[in-house]
Every structure is written in C-alpha cells, then in structure tokens.
Image (tube, rainbow, N blue to C red):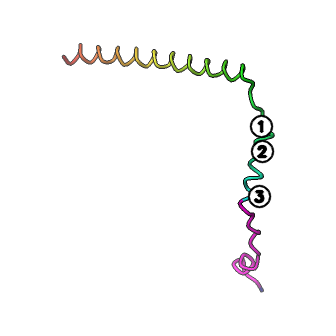
Amino acid sequence: MTTHANKAATKSAPEKKSRFSFFAGVVAELRKAHWPSRQEALRLSILVLAVCVVVGLILGGLDLAFTRLFLLLGG
C-alpha cells in the first residue's frame, strides 16, 4: 500500500533546461510579437503624452482647488 507522500517522492523531477534554450525561447517569442511601425509608434507615443498632460492638469486643478478650500476653511 502506497501513500500520497510516497507517490510524490517517486515521481522524477522534470529535466532542467539549459540557459541557452531559455534565451532561444525568448527570441522565438519576440519574433512572434507584432511590432508597430515607426509612424504607429510615434502616434501612440504622442497619445500617451497627451493623456499624461490632461491627467496632470486635472490632478493639478484638483490639488489647487482643495488647497484653496482648506486655506479658506482653516486659515
């Protein structure tokens, strides 16, 4: 009669892959990826910059409004 612990102990560990095969797999996966064109990358970068500026202005405006509100109430 074997127990659960004995079954786990008798299983052989999977063979360890070499470091070279890991990097070969990374390169293979990167070749499958869709890379944007120069124009698409520029357009998306400008979009990210614009969103950052808009969010920064909104947060800056909220910060200014709350600062003035707290100064009005506490000052």
Dot 2 surroundings within 10 Å: few (below 14), some, or many (20 or more)? few
- Residue marked by disc 2: 29
For image coordinates 78% across by 86% down, the residue present is 1
Dot 1 surroundings within 10 Å: few (below 14), some, or many (20 or more)? few
**In the picture shown, does residue 33 fall above or below 21?**
above
Distance (Cα) linking label 2 and label 1 = 7 Å
Q: Nearer the viewer, residue 29 or 73?
A: 29
Q: Is residue 58 left or right of residue 8?
A: left
Q: Is residue 41 left or right of residue 53?
A: right
Contact (CB < 8 A) between labels 3 and 2?
no
Distance (Cα) linking label 1 and label 3 = 19 Å
- Residue marked by disc 3: 21
Contact (CB < 8 A) between labels 2 and 1?
yes
Mark 3 or mark 2: name the one nearer the start of the chain: 3
For image coordinates 74% across by 27% down, the residue present is 36
Asked where in the image residue 14 lies, by quadrant, the reply is bottom right
Q: Number of callouts in the render?
A: 3
Q: Nearer the viewer, residue 18 or 44?
A: 18
Mark 1 or mark 3: name the one nearer the start of the chain: 3
Callout 3: SS = helix
Q: Which numbered circle lies on residue 33?
A: 1
Callout 2: SS = helix
Residue 6 picture location, percent across and down: 72, 81
Q: Please identify the residue farthest to the bottom as the structure is shown.
A: 1
Q: Which residues are magenta?
A: 2-19
Image quadrant where one finds the C terminus: top left
Question: Which amino acid, by three-letter code, is at mark 2?
Answer: Glu
